[in-house]
Image: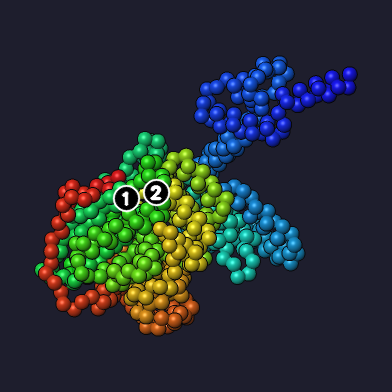
Amino acid sequence: MAARKKKKSASRSRRTPSAPSRARGQARTARKNVAAPGKTQAARRPAPADTTKKPAPSRGAKSAPPDQGDDAAQQRDIERHLKAQLAAMTGGLAPDDYARAWLEWYLGLAQQPQRQQALAQSGWEKLLDSWQFAARAAGGDAMAPGHEALGFGNPAWNQWPFNVYARSYGNWTSWWHQATQPAPGADAKLSPSAFSARLLMEAASPANFLATNPELLQRTAAESGQNLVRGLKNWLEDARRMTEGGPVPGTEGFKVGREVAITPGKVVFRNRLVELLQYSPQTPDVYAEPVFITPAWIMKYYILDLSARNSLVRFLVEKGHTVFMISWKNPDASDRDLGMDDYVQLGFLDTLAQVRRLIPGRKVHAVGYCIGGTLLAIAAALLAARNEHPLASLTLLAAQVDFSEPGELSVFITPSQLAALEAMMQETGVLESERMGGAFAMLRSRDLLWAPAVQQYLRGERPKLNDLMAWNADGTRMPARMHSEYLQGLYLRNELAGGTFKALGVRLDLSRLTVPMFVVGTETDHVAPWQSVYKVRGLTRSTDYTFLLTSGGHNAGIVSGPVHPKRRHRMLTWSDARQNPAPAQWFASAPLFEGSWWPAWENWLARHSDARRVAARQPVAQAGGAIPGAGDAPGEYVLG
């Protein structure tokens, strides 16, 4: 009996696979199922170890567990889709960042009894001031509410009850500004809680609403409401444009190639990412070294070639320089996988090679604006690492290479915000220009969001655009991969300044940059603060280095024209590769000059060029290659 049981047990052990055997069988079956997803559930059951006998599966047999990898991928897709939907609803902001910031603000305040007491006292004083002002204003006498910087300077605001609204709002805003101040030494503009509080305060201004704005009420009464009719029409036009697409109203007077981007030239090279423009000379002879400009790809290149009076390109060619310009393609979803390496190779290196083919035997004055300047620094460091020296000089215009202090944009550069942004870009393949424009507008919401809304929808007035404003409305998209690499590697991890950033597999060292350098910052730049732009000095080793600080902002400061009565600039040059004064020290010692910075830079270019000028040559497209024939500037990509 025992022998029969032992024999039956041995027989069952031969028919029943061991645990390792079952695992191997399941793995083989899983691979077969991947190859043939249409198999039935029975076919997906693990095969027994004894393949000579295939018993029918019992009714109680369990199927193999589902593929955990597929489930995880589906889970990630769902999470990414939800993040994208949430980011679309919040304008790209990550709610968890702001919830965390407010929680930290609350917990920090809870641990500071003295600050609580100070805020309570300040709040009571401001509340008392509002009550007392309201009581005095109720007498009917005109009383200025103060707070002119908040938009209450018009005499209409001196009348009751509008002066009470303005006074109370100003006190309320002042208290919240005090309450959301970060720790001593930190910048309140970089605090998410302070930033979100400011957004809410600016949205709640009585100047934004018809019923609480006396200027709007007077306008409405004077026009019998026609301003509101025009405003509704404007709103409907803008709503239709947002859904159907179309140009921004007012830009029809600034057609590319007709009113702007009109400097004569040819498209002399094209690849899938860029067109290279060479501009026609305006003088019989020219400087031997060409000027090669790399603009930002978050904007159309023609910000440097606006109308004739505002065209940096025209200014240079009229001074005898041969100018080349990159015109970036406006990417679409098919370009989603273009990365930073593509922008280095296709965008800069390939076009630089073409410039050198057209102007052989000469070094090149390389110029980079905004993120184009960052790309120029990356490419120049890569060339130096390869022991190649094709550049005569480097000029960086409002361009950062050290992102440790990126300014107000840092409120958008956090892991949570980047995750939300990447989720949106994965859905579309690109970052739409409206998203980036919206982020910049939130940094100046009073001037860039609410004031235009009041003007167009309550006053019923469309703004009269100039060439720079029309250019600003002509946005571009960003490929998902490139934008993610740029924000993660440069902004978030600051790899370029840290010496860990790689381009085309080569680790870059900015200290290998020793060519003459001319760096320009702008005083009121909220995209690339001049103190951040200044940091390039400490990372490079140029023995001929000039830093210039001009009045104006990121765009208007650079596009100042050759003559500008309201512009001023400070400039200082030094020849010690190690000298690196602090920004405040540089500012105190740099002499102040009146007027545009363009002539000062052009004189610097001329001094760093060969004194013997050469005969000018008209641009001619190269036979064969990536472009079949010459087209006139501004080319095709800028129209995309």
The answer to whether residue 262 is visible is no
Q: Position of residue 49 (x, y in %)?
A: 66, 27
The answer to whether residue 2 is visible is yes
Q: Position of residue 363 (x, y in %)?
A: 25, 70
Amino acid marked by disc 1: Leu
In this view, the residue in front, 362 or 103, is 362
Residue drawn at point x = 25 percent, y = 66 percent: 291
> Which residue in the structure is indicated by mark 2?
338
> Which residue in the structure is indicated by mark 1?
273
Q: Quadrant of the C terminus?
A: top left
Q: Quadrant of the N terminus?
A: top right
The residue positioned farthest toward the front in the image shown: 3
Compared across the picture, whether 396 is left or right of 178 comes to: left
CB under 8 Å between discs 2 and 1:
yes
Compared across the picture, whether 7 is left or right of 292 comes to: right
The residue positioned farthest toward the right in the image shown: 1
In this view, the residue in front, 509 or 459, is 509
The disc label shown at residue 145, or none: none
**Of callouts 2 and 1, which one flags the residue occurring earlier in the amino acid sequence?**
1
Q: Quadrant of residue 299?
A: bottom left
Q: Is residue 519 above or below residue 237?
A: below
Mark 1 secondary-structure assignment: loop
Residue drawn at point x = 64 percent, y = 26 percent: 46
Amino acid marked by disc 2: Leu
In this view, the residue in front, 639 or 461, is 639
Q: Quadrant of residue 226?
A: top left
Q: Quadrant of residue 164?
A: bottom right
Q: CA distance from mark 2 to mark 1?
A: 9 Å
Residue drawn at point x = 41 percent, y = 81 percent: 577
Q: Position of residue 9 (x, y in %)?
A: 80, 24
Mark 2 secondary-structure assignment: loop
Q: Is residue 511 above or below residue 254?
A: below
